Amino acid sequence: MNTVGVLPLSWPRVALASVALLVVLAIVRGMRLGLSRTVLQSAIRGTVQLFAVGYVLAALFAVERPELVLGILLVMVGAAARTAGSRLAPVPGLAWLAGAALSAGTGLSVFFVTAVVVRPSPWFSPQYVVPITGMLLGNAMNGASLAGDRFQDELVSRRAEVEARLSLGLSGAESVHPLQARALRAALIPTLNSFAVAGVVQLPGMMTGQILAGVRPDIAVRYQIVIFILLTMSTALSTFLFLKLLSKRYLTDAHQLRSALLVIGREKPKQRRSPKKSSGSAI
């Protein structure tokens, strides 16, 4: 086995890989999805962000200061909370709710994997904490966004069912529990599916990256198993907390449904409108 490490990849070769985007653009234009600009903007934005974060992480790894690591993590959580909230119908304090849920769910998972399982030295080692947090936070963000969207749709379509439970004397939490359960289940399915087919249908990114870097496959597999377990935990916990916090926004202290928010909830962001009215500016 070649243990030299990752083969050098020049910028011209990276640029050559962008030719693959032509396939995406051909499909998007052929199907008239109206997403051509979004594809290009996403590619450019992602490239610039990754280029910038590469230099930031290089400096961070060299310094290893806990306050800088914490600052990076806060920026990551803030961006994830804003992104998760932007996909949902507007609710007062939605980004703060997402931020609280993601911080708690992902934070507990990162603390467990670094303090109990991996145990790097120092404990705040950015080489471990930042990448692991990024993986867990990204997955939890997607789960919370999917669950929130499903919950809002269910609440609007099953409004009469929820109000009937409330009129029978059930508490607000009991009345919306079936909706929360369906939303949480829908959010967990992608993560569970990925875990179930790991190594058979796909080779996960972290494991592949470590193997390319020359790490022994058995060690890469151990890390990937730990990451998958923590991905499931952080997604489940963050999504569960987000649904609980989101539900409280739709219920009063007297266990009544806030009908005014449901009217707002019917007006989804632009990406949820019909293709005729949408400019395709969001995914």
Image (tube, grey):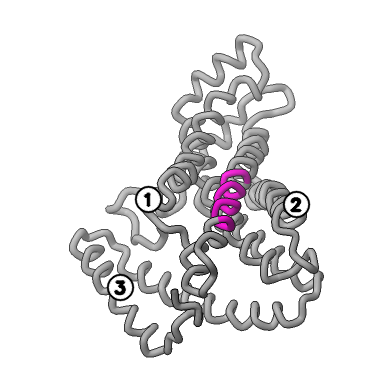
Residue 109 circle label: none
Badge 3 is on which residue?
21
Residue at screen point 51% across, 74% down: 214
Give the amino acid type for the residue marked by disc 1 in the picture: Val
Residue at screen point 48% across, 79% down: 6
Disc 2, SS: helix
Q: Main secondary structure of the magenta part?
A: helix
Residue stretch rendered in magenta on the structure: 222-233
Q: Position of residue 127 (x, y in %)?
A: 67, 71
Q: Is residue 206 magenta?
A: no
Taking depth in this image into account, of 183 and 62 the one nearest to the observer is 62
Q: What is the spatial separation of the Cα atoms under label 2 and label 1, in whole angstroms?
A: 29 Å
Residue 116 circle label: 2
- Nearer-N-terminus badge (1/3): 3
Q: Position of residue 213 (x, y in %)?
A: 51, 75
Q: Position of residue 156 (x, y in %)?
A: 48, 31
Give the amino acid type for the residue marked by disc 2 in the picture: Val
Tag 2 and tag 1, C-beta contact below 8 Å? no
Q: What is the spatial separation of the Cα atoms under label 3 and label 2, in whole angstroms?
A: 42 Å
Residue at screen point 63% across, 34% down: 247
Crowding near pointer 1: few (<14 within 10 Å), some, many (20+)?
Answer: few
Badge 1 is on which residue?
200
Q: Is residue 90 visible?
A: no
- Residue extending farthest to the left is 30
Disc 1, SS: loop
